[in-house]
Amino acid sequence: MVNLALPLAALAMAASVAAAPAATNGTVFSFAQWVEDIIANPDTALTVDEAFAAAQAADVVGAAGGLQKRVRCEVPGWTRAPGRDAAWCVDYLARIGQGGQQCVLDRGNIQMCRRGGAQIVASQARSERLSANCNDVARTAGIIFDNCWRSDDTILGSEICITENRMQININGI
């Protein structure tokens, strides 16, 4: 008697793979990686407009590696921000962090950057002095972008700073 268990299992697996949705174009873009590129070499990194063109022509990576998703993309009472304005702030924070610039939070909420209809705000539950290199604030904002940016070029999101777990980084509209 012939054992058909293995061929049937292979057939079932092939059918499930064939039923899986295909990527839209196979090209991937990550805002978090864009931030790393700015930090590594700001002179060769994509501009804000180039980054948005790349993101719109690709599939944006979510969850920054997929390890853990804590990012909140819908925050009641907050408005969505224009993505390009918020990305300008991310670019700005990544560039000023090059020289070791610290983003300091010494009360409940501090606006780290504002451009057009967007702002990046750091917040905390207490009023203690906290700081993180502005590169790390930009890195956190890149993670927010990878998870919360929408194709209508708006963003709204919140995530804990990657190096200061008492500091929350927020991107929202004004």
Image: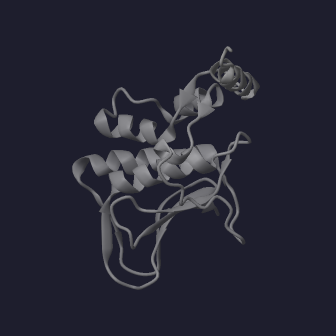
In the picture shown, does residue 154 fall above or below 26?
Answer: below
Residue 122: x and y in percent read: 46, 68
Residue at point 42%, 85% (across, down): 126
Residue 48: x and y in percent read: 52, 36
Number of numbered discs visible in the structure rendering: 0
Pick the quarter of the image with the N terminus.
top right
- Is residue 60 at all visible to an observer of this figure? yes
In the picture shown, does residue 137 fall above or below 54?
Answer: below
- Is residue 88 at all visible to an observer of this figure? no
Front one among 88 and 11: 11
- Image quadrant where residue 38 sits: top left
Residue with the most extreme front position: 1
Residue at point 62%, 27% (across, down): 58
Front one among 157 and 172: 157
Residue with the most extreme top position: 2
- Image quadrant where residue 77 sits: bottom right
Residue with the most extreme left position: 99
